[in-house]
Image (cartoon, helix red, strand yellow):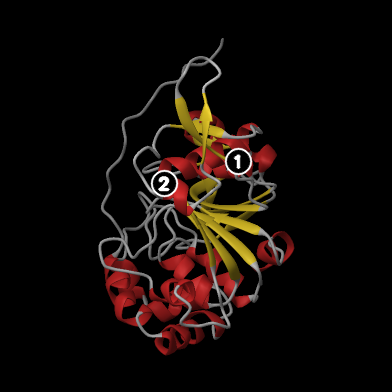
């Protein structure tokens, strides 16, 4: 992880760490903080705790998003303080869309389109708040719809259950816009629970959402998505999200947490040791195997 972030994430980049409640690469976010990257534009549909921590760590000057908060718990104080000017030396520019607007932006970026058309901004104030959401006339009738510009991150970071050394990446469970973000990005870092042989990938090809031909680095980092979850590997650590609420309300508490859990640790192994074996064991799920599929073979 240290080498991948050092080489592929550069000051001033637009960085997308995607994953919709599931498969969020906190380990990558923490390494970006630890390496003190600066002036990043952070893009994400739902910038929850990982971006609250990164923005508190001073890595970003801009946030592009469609919803922000601590899911099911409350707000994100570190982000809020910078948006509202409570910390005037650390301003944060924001650019807001709907969820579908962000998906459309990634899709346009992945398809190399100049914009993505959608209907979802009628009777909302988002086009007023964000002038990049623009009304356009249909070339095939008298309809008026809205368009959003393509989003092409410099770096997309995706957590997954497994990948081959060549970068062919397989996911099961809840998907967000990881595939679109990866295809839109210039550089792609894949973080996985497990590295598997190419034969495993070929035996179940429909799980492959990102092909190795667009991947720049594969990082093997078990538990790298904690406190989010990885279907089949570990559950969401709900206690962590509850515990973050009082921390994020106080800037000094956030900075103390970053010192204890990011800056003073040399990587994910140290983070897991600090978290403790009992806490990790409590998050391990029971078995729930999927039905087998016979793809058939040529004779």
Q: Which residue is mark 1?
A: 150
- Residue 43, quarter of picture: bottom right
**Residue 200 shows up from this direction:** no
Q: Earlier in the sequence, mark 1 or mark 2?
A: 2
The residue lying furthest to the right in this view is 7
Residue under the point 60% across and 61% down: 41
Asked if 133 appears above or below 146 in the picture, the reply is below
Residue 141 location in percent, x, y?
49, 15
Q: Name the foreground residue: 186 vs 144.
A: 144
- Residue displayed at 46% across by 66% down: 50
The secondary structure type at the circle numbered 1 is: loop
| Badge number at residue 98 | 2
Q: Secondary structure at mark 2?
A: loop
Residue 211 image point, x, y percent = 61, 37
Residue 36: horizontal and vertical position, in percent? Answer: 64, 76
Q: Is residue 163 left or right of residue 123?
A: right
- State the residue in front, 14 or 196: 14
Q: Is residue 113 above or below residue 245?
A: above
Q: Residue at x 45, y 57 (%)?
A: 24
């Amino acid at each position: 992880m240290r080498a991948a972030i050092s080489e592929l994430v550069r000051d001033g980049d637009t960085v997308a760490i995607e994953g919709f409640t599931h498969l969020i690469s906190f380990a990558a976010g923490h390494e970006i903080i630890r390496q003190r990257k600066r002036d990043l534009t952070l893009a994400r549909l739902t910038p929850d705790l990982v971006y609250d921590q990164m923005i508190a760590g001073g890595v970003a000057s801009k946030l592009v998003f469609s919803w922000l908060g601590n899911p099911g718990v409350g707000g994100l104080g570190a982000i809020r303080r910078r948006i509202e000017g409570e910390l005037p030396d650390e301003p944060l520019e924001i650019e807001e869309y709907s969820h579908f607007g962000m998906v459309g932006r990634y899709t346009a970026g992945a398809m190399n389109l100049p914009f993505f058309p959608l209907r979802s901004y009628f009777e909302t104030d988002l086009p007023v708040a964000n002038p990049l959401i623009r009304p356009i006339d249909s070339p095939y009738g008298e309809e008026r719809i809205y368009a959003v510009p393509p989003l092409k991150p410099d770096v997309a970071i995706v957590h997954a259950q497994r990948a081959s050394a060549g970068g062919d990446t397989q996911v099961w469970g809840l998907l967000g816009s990881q595939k679109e973000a990866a295809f839109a990005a210039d550089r792609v870092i894949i973080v996985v629970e497990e590295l598997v042989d190419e034969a495993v990938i070929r035996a179940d090809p429909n799980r492959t959402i990102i092909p190795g031909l667009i991947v720049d680095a594969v990082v093997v980092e078990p538990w790298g998505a904690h406190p989010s979850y990885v279907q089949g590997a570990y559950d969401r650590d709900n206690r962590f999200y509850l515990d973050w609420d009082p921390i994020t309300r106080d800037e000094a508490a956030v900075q103390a947490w970053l010192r204890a859990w990011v800056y003073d640790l040399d990587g994910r192994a140290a983070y897991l040791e600090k978290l403790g074996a009992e806490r990790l064991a409590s998050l391990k799920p029971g078995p729930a195997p999927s039905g087998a599929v016979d793809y058939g073979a040529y004779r």
